[in-house]
């Protein structure tokens, strides 16, 4: 099967932050998001909202020991050459200085974006299967991530959305740092991903993912850190601010994308609390994950592969972060 690259659109033109009264936008979204969720829950929650079969998927769904179900290495390699440059972001090492606007409502704020997985993880299974300590237990350093049924990888998706998100945040004056920008062969490990946010003293960290659940399972969900106090993990100080961050991201994501909260986890709220993710357990700064949709559902996959939709997703996440930081 020949590889056909997704149709990526360039990011939206730069807008002056001054043209958009963010505080008003946030207030409006709070109402709109709640109304929107009511509609979604009334119309779409036919499954009872419980995690059904196939819903065990989380952001670290698949061990690297399990072969990728569809993406063949060749196809993914093609994708590697194809979509990174069209993602609307800039390259450069993840540790490089950000280039925020000279001014803007987020001036002085530090945001760490964590593009989930790494396109190179498929070729570095030994390295990413190495166990790291996450406070409560030991867990694989990283995972390959999932893919659509026709082989588009989550790792490429997360980088593209992250780059779009970086552009939007920098336009508002934020300083943005990545945990990886396809500038390293694999990883980083989940403990290092957390450490990058901690050492940056980030005001907010968002880890970008897409899920690998069963067909028919649709929608996005934001993962919040639960209270963990064990070993090197102590999330107690970040539980409340992370929830606020997550609620804002979820609300703005609904409004920007029109996507419904997950119909398979979170009981229609789009919010799920977990205590088994190293990237959250080891964070000392407000942090959430977002699973933007389910790559294994064909309808969700069509959205996830759309450049237009990705731009909306990035905008929703950026507005959620901005709302949190300005509060
Ligand atoms: Zn993931």
Image (cartoon, rainbow, N blue to C red):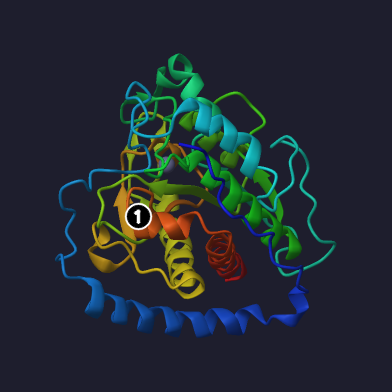
Q: Is residue 227 left or right of residue 141?
A: left
Question: How many numbered tags mark residues here?
Answer: 1
Q: Can residue 241 be seen in this view?
A: no
**Quick one: quadrant of the N terminus?**
top left
* Residue 300 % position (x, y): 38, 58
**Quick one: quadrant of the C terminus?**
bottom right
Quadrant containing ligand 1 reads top left
Identify the residue shown where x is 47% and y is 32%.
190
Secondary element at image label 1: helix
155 vs 187: above or below = below
* Residue 272 % position (x, y): 31, 56
Identify the residue shown where x is 37% and y is 43%.
149
Q: Is residue 103 visible?
A: yes
Instruction: Quickly name the residue at label 1.
Output: 298
Question: Looking at the image, which is closer to me, 202 or 32?
Answer: 32
135 vs 103: above or below = above
Question: Looking at the image, which is closer to me, 221 or 225?
Answer: 221
On the image, which quarter does residue 278 sit in?
Answer: top left
Identify the residue shown where x is 25% and y is 63%.
263
* Residue 210 % position (x, y): 42, 49
Toward the top, the furthest residue is 126
81 vs 222: above or below = above
On the image, which quarter does residue 146 sit in?
Answer: top left
Question: Looking at the image, which is closer to me, 273 or 49?
Answer: 49
């Amino acid at each position: 099967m020949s590889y056909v690259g997704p149709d990526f659109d360039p990011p939206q033109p730069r807008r002056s932050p001054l043209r958009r009264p963010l505080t008003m936008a946030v207030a409006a979204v709070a109402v709109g998001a709640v109304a929107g969720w009511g509609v979604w829950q009334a119309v779409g929650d036919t499954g009872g909202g419980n995690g059904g079969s196939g819903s065990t998927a989380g952001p670290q769904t698949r061990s690297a020991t399990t072969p990728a179900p569809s993406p063949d290495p060749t196809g993914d390699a093609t994708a590697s050459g194809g979509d990174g440059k069209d993602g609307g972001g800039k390259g450069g090492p993840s540790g490089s200085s950000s280039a925020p606007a000279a001014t803007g409502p987020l001036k002085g704020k530090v945001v760490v974006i964590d593009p989930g997985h790494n396109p190179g993880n498929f070729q570095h299974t030994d390295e990413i299967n190495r166990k790291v300590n996450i406070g409560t237990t030991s867990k694989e350093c990283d995972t390959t991530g999932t893919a659509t049924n026709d082989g588009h990888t989550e790792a490429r998706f997360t980088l593209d959305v992250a780059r779009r998100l970086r552009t939007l945040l920098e336009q508002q004056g934020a300083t943005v740092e990545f945990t990886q920008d396809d500038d390293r062969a694999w990883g980083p490990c989940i403990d290092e991903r957390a450490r990058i946010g901690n050492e940056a003293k980030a005001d907010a960290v968002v880890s970008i993912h897409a899920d690998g659940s069963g067909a028919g399972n649709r929608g996005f969900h934001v993962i919040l850190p639960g209270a963990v106090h064990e070993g090197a993990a102590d999330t107690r100080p970040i539980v409340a601010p992370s929830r606020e961050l997550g609620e804002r991201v979820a609300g703005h994501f609904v409004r920007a994308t029109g996507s419904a909260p997950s119909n398979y986890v979170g009981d229609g709220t789009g919010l799920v609390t977990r205590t088994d993710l190293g990237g959250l357990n080891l964070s000392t700064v407000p942090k959430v994950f977002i699973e933007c949709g389910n790559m294994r559902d064909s309808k969700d996959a069509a959205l996830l592969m759309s450049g237009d939709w990705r731009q909306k997703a990035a905008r929703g996440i950026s507005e959620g972060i901005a709302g949190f930081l300005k509060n």
